[in-house]
């Protein structure tokens, strides 16, 4: 996209999550724990034209870099996403998300009896299968929309 076609301004520092599956931007914000009240500066492009994807979403978060576990869960919501780290207006790092064998941290197990929901210091961990996610502690399967099981 040329600068004359830019819909959202460039940012000085932070993370640009580009090539997000069209319509998933709000799920990406939920994944990052951003609801606006924390004061983070965020710019969104939703369903913008993309040569590669037809349509895409773009999420720009200022003053923040993604953690590895956030990037891993992001890969399940937006498998084509590119994570661009911006410093002083320059892209200093560009990564594609990779589908991990396991994800932890930002998802909660839907089984209320699961040890990970008992207030113990146990981080929920899920095996990534072809047809969903499986809780490593209780074996519960998450086959449908994983964004329904995001923490917070
Ligand atoms: N970007 C930004 N602020 C900056 C620099 C870049 O918001 N200071 C955004 C761009 O608008 C783009 C993304 O970060 O959405 C990646 O920038 P760049 O690598 O320059 O763009 P492309 O070459 O088009 O990226 P790709 O090849 O990954 O499509
Ligand atoms: Zn469980």
Image (cartoon, helix red, strand yellow):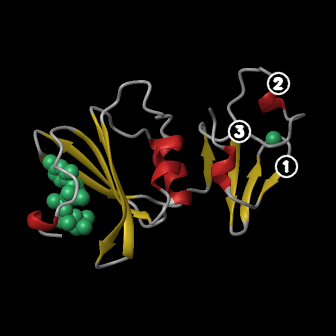
Q: Quadrant of the N terminus?
A: bottom left
Going from N to C along the chain, the mark reached first, 2 or 3, is 3
Residue 109 image position (x, y, % from top left): 76, 41
Label 1 CB-ligand 2 distance < 8 A: yes
Task: List the residue tagged with mark 1.
Answer: 139
Q: Which mark is residue 51?
A: none
Residue at image position (28%, 79%) is: 51
Q: Marks 2/3: CA distance?
A: 11 Å
Q: Reply above or below: 148 against 32.
A: below
Locate residue 106 relative to residue 79 in the image: left or right.
right
Mark linked to residue 108: 3
* Disc 3 element: loop
Ligand 1 quadrant assignment: bottom left
Crowd tier of the residue under label 1, counting other residues whose Cα lies within 10 Å: few below 14, some 14–19, many 20 or above? some
For the residues carrying marks 1 and 2, which lies nearer the camera in this image?
2
Residue 43 location (% of width, % of height): 30, 45
Q: Which disc number belongs to residue 118?
A: 2
Residues 15 and 69: in front is: 15
Marked residue nearer the N-terminal end (3 or 1): 3
What x and y, as percent, mark residue 79? 48, 65
Q: Quadrant of residue 151?
A: top right
Circle 1 sits in a helix, a strand or a loop, which is it?
A: loop
Q: Determine if residue 69 is in view.
A: no
- Mark 2 is surrounded, within 10 Å at the Cα level, by few (under 14), some (14 to 19) or many (20 or more) other residues, namely few
């Amino acid at each position: 996209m040329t600068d004359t076609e830019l819909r959202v301004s460039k940012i000085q520092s932070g993370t640009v999550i580009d090539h997000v599956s069209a319509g998933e931007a709000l799920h990406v914000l939920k994944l990052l724990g951003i609801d606006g009240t924390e004061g983070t500066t965020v710019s969104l492009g939703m369903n913008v034209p993309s040569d590669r994807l037809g349509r895409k979403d773009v999420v720009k978060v200022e003053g923040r870099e993604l953690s590895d576990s956030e990037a891993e869960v992001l890969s399940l919501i937006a498998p084509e996403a590119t994570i661009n780290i911006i410093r002083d207006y320059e892209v200093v790092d560009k990564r594609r998300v990779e589908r991990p064998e396991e994800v932890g941290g930002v998802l909660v197990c839907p089984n209320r009896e699961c040890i990970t929901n008992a207030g113990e210091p146990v981080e929920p961990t899920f095996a990534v299968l072809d047809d969903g996610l499986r809780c490593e502690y209780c074996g519960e399967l998450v086959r449908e929309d994983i964004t329904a099981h995001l923490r917070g």
